[in-house]
Amino acid sequence: MSAAPGSTLWLLRHELRLAWHGAALNKNRTRRPGGATIAIWGVGWVALHLVAFMLMRELDRDGMDAAHLAIPLTVMVITCATFMLSSALRSAVLSLFERGDLDLLLSSPLPSRSIFAVRLLGIAAAVATPYVFLAGPFANAALLVGHPGWLGLYVMIGTCAMVMACAGMLLTLALVRVLGARRTRVVAQVVAAVAGALLFLLTQAYNLTRHGDSAGPGILALLASHRAFGTDSALWLPGHAVLGAPLPLLAAVLLAGVAFALTVHRTHGFFVHGLQQAAGTGRARTRPAGALRFRFRRNLFDTIVIKEWRLIARDPNLIAQVLLQLIYLVPMLLPVLRDGKTGPAIGAALTLLCSSLAGSLTWIVVLAEDASDLLLSAPAPRRTIQLAKLAAATMPPLLLVALPLCWLIAHAPLTGMLFAFTVCAAVLSAGLIVLWTGRPAPRSDFKTRGKENFLCSMLEMIGSLCWAGLGWLLTSLSTQGATWMAVAAAVVLALGLGVLLLAWMLRRHPV
Amino acid sequence: MLIDSPALRIAALRKSFGRPAVDGLDLTVRRGELYALLGPNGAGKTTTLRMVTGLLAPDTGTVEVLGIDIARDPAGAKRGMAYLPDDPLLYGKLKPTEYLEFVAGLWGIRAEDAEPRARHLLDWLDLAPHAHELTEGFSRGMKQKLALAGALIHEPELLILDEPLTGLDAAAARQVKDLLVSHVEKGGTVILTTHILEVAERLAQRIGIIRQGRLIAEGTLAELRARTHGGSLEDVFLHLTEGQAG
């Protein structure tokens, strides 16, 4: 399809091309995805179709009751909409304030409304794409088993993505007016990350609270018994739209259209009237020169520790990402915590969490150093710098865990003492593994650090599991005294030390 | 630190990244002079400076800073010098006061000495009103000035600057140039690379021109002009580096 240069269609194609390049950058950030990547995604999509087909055939056999299906489908639409809002926020900040091509576009003869319309369409397309990939096979499979109404799913994904793209854009503009562009970027990243994590935890709440297998149907039965939540309630219209009901679908399309028109108008006004510049001015607080306050430290160690803590404390986005990693560990720990033996379970859980936190902080403090050349060009001893950085990374998890450990020691002294040992060992081990085997990277790569350095991540994970397992085995050994536990504890200890030794042997040598 | 030794002595320095970046470079910079190292893009200027400052290990050759071999005693050699790369070495989440506290800590400056120097530098470079803001919001010029303050807080004898005037407005550029001249007048040594030949022409006492990792010409402006039968430094530079692409 050819489009005249300068037309809206041409601009949209340019926007989508940029989104394609940006969404799937390879490791070196230089090329778009290759044939192999596309082939893997293709195979995955075909596999999803098979799963979807089996599920849809089951539903078809059960009669495909639209009234009841609309309830879980509505819940899914709302859940996905929240995720979409989270990614729309990120995309809006990127698209409006980070990509840096708006001035070029606005200085061209292209109509400015078209520019913002295309930008909004680009965000909506980027937001919708993963859902089309994941949910599309279900609509296709439903078509195959004789339920074409399910094609409404595509329409709902499109309209939902558009509404959420508009919401993300408007929210971003509002934040920029209040906070300025730079802070908005941070807030948007934190909100996006927290929104994702909250939903993740909600999905895990069922696992956390259930005592049998009847909670899900029980909730549905409870909802059905309340008039406002009955199967004929208007609340479930999004679900009916997914199933192809014409009126709800039409309403969704109209809503998306109105939201699109309003948002384009609003965004256009915001930029054309220079509100982003106004938002950025007058925020710098200045103080008279006489108010200069210095706190020069007596030694290099303290200076480095304080500097590292300041850098972390002032980066809410990074803190959110680090804490999110811990949140995602919670479901893994639930089975451990649910088995009734809370002493060893809590100890093992704390060991695992602290180790993960120490690994993350060491990565940030040691490997994501912003001015490594400054440190290298200074006459400061390298060993002192590394020790201070390691201390800066390992002290926060140890301080965080101090209180629960004290509680554990008060309630079960031997267990508490054993876990105090394994927590310290795990924290130190994680810090050293990252220090020795990690590769320097910018802080913005924090989320992808596992993929960038698989070996380091694996060693870190195995080390953590070993120390947590050792704590568990030692406490169990102290109460049950089984011989196999002593053997297992010795093996796990040897493995933990072996991982550390391997990391030391593979350590990277700086210049 | 040997008083009679030159500020910098480089002998037979080589570094290769697949192809030679610095190829048998010999260079001597005397104490108390402002030396400009010029060359087209990719000539090996930054690689040379990174080896001088200990950021990069040479393949062969020696570097002596203030009479100290940087390979044998890196801490001793680094103690008397400061390096300011073209991309300022700053932390966006630190305030200028905190940045200077940190740099002073790295060079082991006592608080009693560091505080008045930091205060003076922030005042002199017009950064005092912004001393309590995070540097991530600073303009390029403000960042460059803060990095310069960091480089000067330990009063280095040898100041090495890689493209120090890039992106600075006229006022900030003037401040930096005055600072360099003042540093030399006080007995310090400055080595700088720049693409702004007028700066080298006006400030430098000696100029070295490097091409493909080798020093192809060196001397005062008058000596270089004499070699190429007159003209401006630009004429001399283009004549010597003619035909070399970046």
Image (cartoon, rainbow, N blue to C red):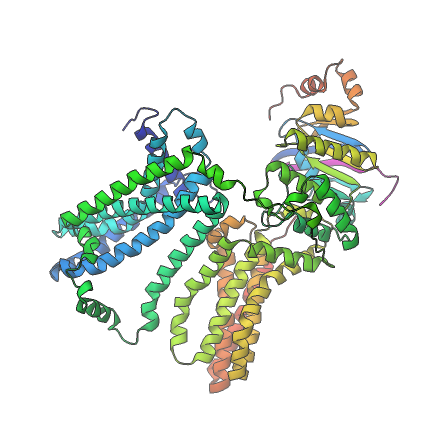
Residue B115 locus on image (x, y percent): 75, 51
| Residue farthest to the right, as pictured | B4
Residue B187 image point, x, y percent? 84, 37
Q: Position of residue A12 (x, y in %)?
A: 33, 33
Q: Residue at x 30, y 76 (%)?
A: A211
Judged left or right of residue A367, residue B202 is right
Q: Looking at the picture, does residue A32 appear above or below residue A447?
A: above
Q: How many marks can you see?
A: 0
Picture coordinates of residue A440 (x, y %)? 57, 50
The answer to whether residue A507 is seen in the rendering is no
Relative to B138, say whether B174 is above or below: above
Q: Is residue B245 above or below residue B188?
A: above
Q: Inspect this view and state whether residue A402 appears.
A: yes
What range is drawn magenta here? Answer: B1-18
Q: Residue at x 74, y 23 (%)?
A: B201
Answer left or right for A491 relative to A3.
right
Foreground pick, B93 / A293: A293
Question: Residue, x 30% and y 54% (percent of image)?
Answer: A80
| Residue A139 or residue A467, whichever sits in front | A139
The quadrant the N terminus of chain A occupies is: top left
Which of these two is toward me, A159 or A112? A112
Residue shown at 50%/57% (left/top)? A319
Q: Quadrant of residue A7?
A: top left
Q: Seen in the image, is A417 located left or right of residue B73?
A: left
